[in-house]
Amino acid sequence: MSLIQSPKRRPDAPAPTPSPASPAVERPRTGPAALLGLLTAAGGPRYAAALLVDALGTGLLRPFLLLYGIGVLALDAGAAGLAMSAGMVAGLLVLPLTGRWIDLGARSLPAAATLLVRAAGSVTLLLADGVAGFTAAAVLLGVGSQSWPATHAAVVSTLTEGRTRDAALAAGRTLRNAGLGAGALLATLAVAGGTGTLQLLAGVTAAACLLAAGLVHSLRVSAPPAEAPQPSAATTAPAPGPVPASVPTTAPDPALRRITLLSVANLPFAFTFDVLEVALPALLVLHLHASAAWSSGIFVGNTVLVIALQLAVVLRLGERSRHTVLAAGGLALTLSYLGFWAAGGLGGTAAAGAVAVVSVLYTFGEILYSGSGTALVAATAPPHLLGRALARWELSMGVGRALAPAALTALLAAGPGVLWPALAGTTLLASVAVARLRPRG
């Protein structure tokens, strides 16, 4: 398989004009075959297999790791949770280093390293016999899991471009959501099979990650380190007189500054996923006194809709500005939060049913957000700062998700009338910020 790509068009260069001698560039097709084609667009079948391993591993890690600590190692739930939090924090701290590694030109090697670290975490889990060993495993798994999205996006951005890149990223997310469901199901079966099955599952996960790391590394994808654009002679002419020592000699890259602001605006968006996993179940069970089956049904429905619609929506909105799509996703989420607030006032089964209906709008907002966020960063980032840009975006995602459970439960404890307006207001402000950060001219 050849990984040689035609030179990418510069972001500021005009699009090529089709002519009889030069046919128009083929756009990603829709349909059942589109997902498979896009999964192999960046790296071929070997990379697609690695994506499948990552998807299943992601689905296993969240329920499986905690259950392993409690069921196999007989740890206290609080101690196991603290170890998992340490793993998440370690992963966030490593992200900036991962971004700089990518900016040196590495692509498949960092992606393979994240899978290798995850395999090491699974092996450490098998060898653990107490809190220290479980914490070490959680740290390794956290580092591998947190760095994977940035390294994956860097590989896709190197082998694809434009809207094909957006669609390939969406296809990967579709597979990832399917893996979440399949992994959760496997974890459920493992619990029913006892501690021996949990240990077998850890061993299988380690072997699968090790195999995927080898597959990704075999692609040998890299990019020459891109140099920062040199300022023109007119802007580099020294001013008369001595230059004060306190004046910096280089100015920060405006594109990276815009991405940093986008990452700050992303913090309220990052709460989105825990709204589904934390806020809605708590609202339904604790405040509306509805059956837990409602929250399970909403979660399953959300997963099915994301799998079915994510790629189709990205392809459908391919002509729209990514800033506009991201801001529209925030607006849809804002309206859904207000809808959850209003639905809770109905009481009884009617309230639970209304929450389920509003969750469709919430899911649509999630699809718009997840389908445009990373793609926007990849399209905006200068080539020599791609890794740092992706790392900052994923860092904001990780920080938001780390803060979300505590913040959401605290707000809900004060009442639904506090939680939903707060979420709606911050998400709306973030959407306005995203729209204003769109380059003008």
Image: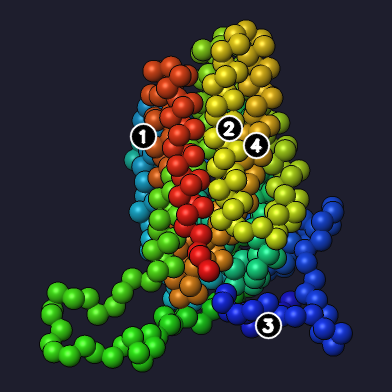
Q: Position of residue 394 (x, y in %)?
A: 47, 53
Residue in the picture at 54% in, 35% down = 334
Q: Helix or strand or loop: what does disc 3 sit on? A: loop
Residue 6: which numbered mark, if any? Answer: 3
Q: Nearer the viewer, residue 261 or 391?
A: 261
Name the kind of residue labelled 3 in the image: Ser
Q: Position of residue 173 (x, y in %)?
A: 64, 50
Residue in the picture at 51% in, 13% down = 286
Q: Position of residue 68 (x, y in %)?
A: 50, 33
**Residue denoted by label 1:** 82
Mark 2 touches mark 1? (CB < 8 Å): no
User: Sequence order check: which comes first, mark 1 or mark 3?
Assistant: 3
On screen, residue 223 versus residue 389, left or right, reads right
On screen, residue 352 versus residue 237, left or right, reads right
Distance between the alpha carbons at the discs numbered 2 and 1: 35 Å
| Picture layout, residue 302 above or below residue 44 | above
Closer to the observer: label 1 or label 3? 3
On screen, residue 315 versus residue 292, left or right, reads right
Q: Position of residue 50 (x, y in %)?
A: 64, 58
User: Sequence order check: which comes first, mark 1 or mark 4?
Assistant: 1
Q: Helix or strand or loop: what does disc 4 sit on? A: helix
**Residue denoted by label 4:** 363
User: Sequence order check: which comes first, mark 2 or mark 1?
Assistant: 1
Residue in the picture at 66% in, 10% down = 349
Q: Helix or strand or loop: what does disc 2 sit on? A: helix
Quadrant of the rendered image containing residue 291 = top right
